[in-house]
Image (spheres, rainbow, N blue to C red):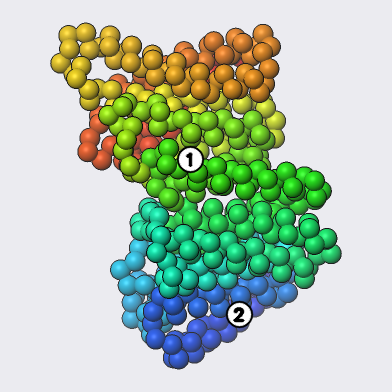
Amino acid sequence: MSWQSLISSVASSLLVLLVLVALLWLLSCFSKPSERSRKLIHMFMGLTCLGLPWLFDSPTPVIILSIIVSILLSALKLSQQSKLYPVLFSVGRRSIGEVCFPLGVSLTFVLSNGVLTHYIAPVAILALADSLSALIGMRFGSKFYKVVNGSKTLEGSLAFFLTAAAAAFVTLSLLTSESFTHMVMVALIAAIAATAFEGMSWGGLDNLFVPVGTLLVLAQIDGQSDLQLSHTLAVFSGVFLLILALKRLSTLEGGAALAVVGYMYVCYMLGGLAWLLLPVVLYASYRRLMPKRFAKIVSTHSIFGVLSVASVGIFWLLASHKSDAYIYPYATALATHGAIIASAHIHLNAFDDCANWDKLKLYAIGCSVLKSWSLIFIPLMFMTGFSADHVVKLFLAPIWIFVATAIFVTTTKVGPDFRNSSSRWIKQGVCAALGSALALVGTM
């Protein structure tokens, strides 16, 4: 890029920024600081960003603008002296939304690669659905579900879904010439995905997850026929309803359950039906794997447990690149998670003082491994076929699962905060990654 182009990009970005700040200042003069006023300003800023594709024909000025806005908003938040502070920020609330908002918009602009619907629809959903859902949730919300640092309302999430569907449909109606049925299906898919991404978010991360996640879904379904879209819509809606219906069989908070929905969408979009069904089996059965004394615990696990399971799975999904090349280590990672869940608490039982405790521990780990292995690998064999190679992998899998699970159990000390400890989930993810790596190397 030439110096002239860079200077032009900076100048145009600063001009847009000055207009934005001036309008925010005027709004602060005519509205009292409250969560409602902050959401209205959030809506205004999002709607203003809808004009960026017509102002800039390259991503450079948008990136520069997002950096400047992030620095300015962060400085305002840290100083707490500006007249804009009480209008833009909620006192006492921990959030990085002031950084995630410009980052989410600029990333969406870059990743959309000039496709207007891929930019306009996600940003319109961020601007309208996110703001209206918060306002409706504050006014009418009565049924709450937990997220990492607070709670959200079912009424607000429903409002988010309806607004997101309307925003996506209007965008498609104005910018494409597709059939009515086609636009409805795309709008519903985008709305379901965006609702899951918003529901799982906390601390302002929805400003990043919603636009970027929605864009990636739109990019994946771009060019699908009506028949293909109907299949995708059926899977998206079916997974959404299934995960929520099975929530009572899990120990997850509401936001964590929605994170499972988001992960299932990634599994389906990147891998296909087989990659989707295996984590569904784990989700539906993992509470049965828990020792009886813990099986009746109410929802206690946060989104970090989901991230522990999803991180390794997404790695193998990306490595496979829409093939079944690495579905075996992927299944091994899921089975390892199941075995760890089944055996993580075994040393809390009455055998602590038993002379044969080490043998009993190995026996308990072995039983946990076999239960988890059968839940994951038997369905996998029916999906991939009983070839000689698959049968060999089937019977070798318990070895890799046992090694990874034994390492976790023998190196982990259970304490009062064990269930939601970040170190526990990190270690569990590392052990699952080890099990899947052993599975890959052991069958080469």
Q: Gap in Å between the C-alphas at discs 1 and 2?
A: 48 Å
Quick check: 274 left or right of 86?
Answer: right
The residue at the point 50 percent across, 27 percent down is 333
Task: Please tell me whether residue 169 is drawn above or below residue 402 in the rendered image.
Answer: below
Helix, strand or loop at mark 1:
loop
Q: Amino acid at mark 1?
A: Leu
Task: Please tell me whether residue 423 is drawn above or below residue 347 in the rendered image.
Answer: below
Please provide percent x and percent y for residue 78.
35, 71
Task: Please tell me whether residue 31 is drawn above or below residue 60 in the rendered image.
Answer: below
Label 2, residues with CA under 10 Å away: few <14, some 14-19, many ≥20: some
In the picture, the disc for residue 81 is none
Q: Residue furthest left?
A: 353
The residue at the point 56 percent across, 46 percent down is 241
Report which residue position mark 2 lands on.
Answer: 16
Helix, strand or loop at mark 2:
helix
Report which residue position mark 1 lands on.
Answer: 246
**In terms of image quadrants, where is residue 404?**
top left
Label 1, residues with CA under 10 Å away: few <14, some 14-19, many ≥20: some
The disc, 1 or 2, on the residue closer to the chain's N-terminal end is 2
Q: Quadrant of the C terminus?
A: top right
Q: Quadrant of the N terminus?
A: bottom right
Residue 11 versus residue 36: which sits nearer the camera?
Answer: 36
Please provide percent x and percent y for residue 156.
48, 64
Please provide percent x and percent y for residue 199.
49, 55
